[in-house]
Amino acid sequence: MSDKRARVGWRGYLPAIVTPFAADGALDLPGLGAMLEWLHGEGMHGLVVAGTTGEWTSLSADERATLFRAAGSQMSGKLPLLAGCSSFTASESLQFAGHAAESGFDGILVTPPPYLRPNEDEIFGFYADISKATPLPICVYNWPPGTGIDMSVELLERLAGLDNVVAIKQSTSNLRRFLQTFFQLGDQVLVFGHSMDEHGLTILQAHGGDGTMGAGGALGRIHADFYNHLWRGEIAAARECGRKDRVLLDEWYTQDLVGRFGSGPAVLKAALKLRGVPAGFVRPPLRDVSPDATAVIRHTLISLGVAA
C-alpha cells in the first residue's frame, strides 16, 4: 500500500448527500440534522457534503461554510466527512477547504472548473495550486456530465502524483477508462466509482477496491450493506443489495447519470421524503419533481421493499 493510500481511512459507500432547503429557499438546518442522523443510523461509511447532489452551484460562500459547520459539528469523528469544494478557481476551493478543515472534515472533493473547459495543463495547474495549500487531503472528481470534461487516464496519473491527492472519484461513463484508472492508479491512490452490479462485484471480488461515492443514499442501509456483505464474504447477499441499487440507476437515471424526470437532486429528495427523511426542496432553477414522477419513484421504492 502506498503512503498516500494509507493516509486516509475512506472506503465503502459514501453518499453525496442532498442539501435540504425550506420552501422559501433557505437552508433547512434542522432538516439537515435529522437527515444526517438517519444516514448515520443506516450505516453509511462516510458522507460527501456540498457535492453535485448537494446543489453546490446554488450555495453562496457563506452558506457553504454554514453547511460545513453544521455537518461537522454533528458528524465529525463519527464517520469520514468529505467537503465538496468545487469552484471556478483554486483560491475559491482553498477558501472552502479552510472552512471544511475548521469544521472537522477529513478531506475535500474537487472537480475541474466547470463550464470553462480548461485543457489538461490548466487542469493540472488548478489541482497543483490546491495541493500546495490545502489543509486537507484531496479526492479528484472526474465528473463529465457536470464539467464537460472526461479526464484522460494520463492526466489522472499526473494528478495522482501531487502530494495531497489521495483519491480519485472516477465517474466516467466510459467503462474502459474506469478500468484503466483502477488498474493503473489503484496502487497509488484510492479509486472510487465501482458499480454495484455483477460487473463491479466481479472486479471487487477478484482485485479488491475502495468503494463507491453514490448519490443521496436513498436506499439507506442497502447501499452500505453491499460492501458490508462483500467484506464478510457474503457474496449472494452483496449481489442482492447491488441488484436493488441497479434498479434505481436503471429506472431513475439515463446512462449518463442524468435524472429521467427531473434533476438528480430533485429525484433523490423526492425519494428520501417518501422514506420519511426531511430532504427538503430544491432551489431554482431546479424544480421539484411532479406528482406523476413522485408516483413512479414511490413505485420503485415499494418494489424494493423500502416504502409502503
Image: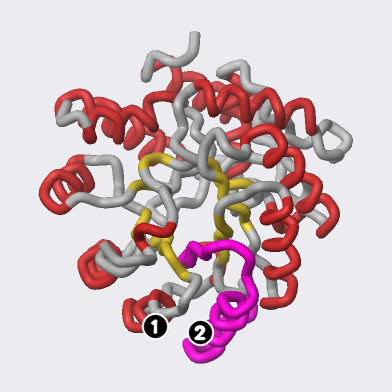
The kind of residue on which mark 1 rests is Arg
Circle 1 SS class:
helix
Q: Which residue is mark 2?
A: 124
The kind of residue on which mark 2 rests is Phe
User: Is the residue marked by circle 1 packed among few (<14), some (14-19), or many (20+) residues within 10 Å?
Assistant: few
Residue located 67% across and 77% down the image = 90
Decide: marks 2, 1 in contact (CB < 8 A)?
yes
Q: Quadrant of residue 214?
A: top left
Query: Could you tell me if residue 265 is visible in this image?
Result: yes
Locate the N terminus and report the quarter of the image it occupies.
bottom left
- The chosen color scheme is secondary structure
What is the number of the mark on residue 158? 1
Furthest toward the bottom, the residue is 121
Q: Is residue 140 magenta?
A: yes
Q: Quadrant of residue 186?
A: bottom left
Query: Could you tell me if residue 171 is visible in this image?
Result: no
How far across and how far down the image is residue 230, in percent? 22, 34
Is 255 situated above or below 40? below
Direction from residue 194 to residue 183 in the image, left or right: left
Please report the bounds of the magenta region as a residue range. Answer: 115-143
Q: Is residue 156 magenta?
A: no
Between 149 and 285, the residue placed more toward the observer is 149
Q: Considering only order in the chain, which callout, 1 or 2, is on the residue closer to the N terminus?
A: 2
Between 286 and 222, the residue placed more toward the observer is 222
Is 292 situated above or below 159? above
User: Is the residue marked by circle 2 packed among few (<14), some (14-19), or many (20+) residues within 10 Å?
Assistant: some
Q: How many numbered marks, from 0 up? A: 2
Between 37 and 308, the residue placed more toward the observer is 37
Q: CA distance from mark 2 to mark 1?
A: 7 Å
Residue located 61% across and 76% down the image = 130
How far across and how far down the image is residue 73, in percent? 72, 37
Is 170 situated above or below 201? below
